[in-house]
Amino acid sequence: MYEYFLGQITDVTPGFVVIEVAGIGYKVLTANPYRYQVGDAAVKMYIHQAVSDNGMSLFGFYDADEKALFEKLLNVSGIGPKSALAILANNDHAGLIQAINQGNATYLTSFPGVGKKTAQQIVLDLKDKLNDLNVAVTGQTALEMPTDSADGALSDALAALEALGYSAREIKKITKKLEAFSQTKSVDTNDLLSEGLRLLTK
């Protein structure tokens, strides 16, 4: 079982990144691929390995606490890796834990793949059991994100939301707001994806 990889990011897509370790490129699913960039600097990525009937998948995380939060979510009945990843895509993990501790099931249903019953199960299983995790608003690697063209960054952010499981209807509802957001200041794909997740879960 892998704990973490230390290597170089060689590819970033809306749904996954490729990290090269000792000459081998690993496809790693991550909540927000645009936290990373292709570059020469070494990146430490914590890894969860999942084995299913369809094969093996690797999931990557910014730090050990984010990985631990993912694995705690997986222990909830009705939550699979894709749903857990979509929940973690919203970088406000402290807010997520607060919502769970307060029994705010309505907030939890804003994530794709989480219905009312599953949201209630998350509260039941995890309430007051996540306070030992050192989480806050995470989301940036030590690398500086490059400035994308506004149109390209927006397209990539929308594709990433779709990869996380949000429906075309949900994405369409926030597209104009994201377009306006992209024009107000210099933003990159990571900024747009974070803002999209904020709009979808508020």
Image: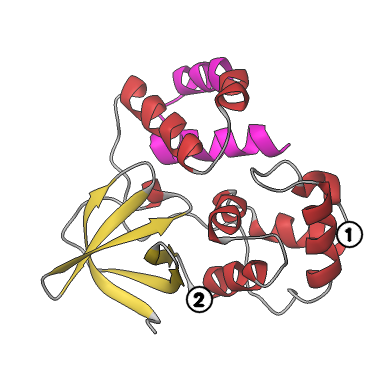
Picture quarter containing residue 66?
bottom right
Q: Are marks 1 and 2 in contact (CB under 8 Å)?
A: no
Residue drawn where x is 69% and y is 39% of the image = 201
Specify whether 102 is left or right of 91: right
- Give me the disc on residue 84: none
Residue drawn where x is 35% and y is 22% of the image = 150
Amino acid type at mark 1: Gln
Q: Residue 125 in the image: x percent, y percent?
A: 81, 71
Q: Residue 199 in the image: x percent, y percent?
A: 65, 32
Quarter of the figure that contains the C terminus: top right
- Give me the disc on residue 64: 2
Placement of 12 over or under 44, stated as above or below: above
Residue drawn where x is 54% and y is 54% of the image = 82
Placement of 31 over or under 176, stated as above or below: below
What's the magenta region? 175-202
Specify whether 148 is left or right of 73: left
Q: Residue 60 in the image: x percent, y percent?
A: 41, 65
Compare residues 44 and 126 and report the one nearer the observer: 126
Picture quarter containing residue 14?
top left
Amino acid type at mark 2: Ala
- Give me the disc on residue 102: 1
Query: Would you say residue 184 sits in the magenta stretch?
Result: yes
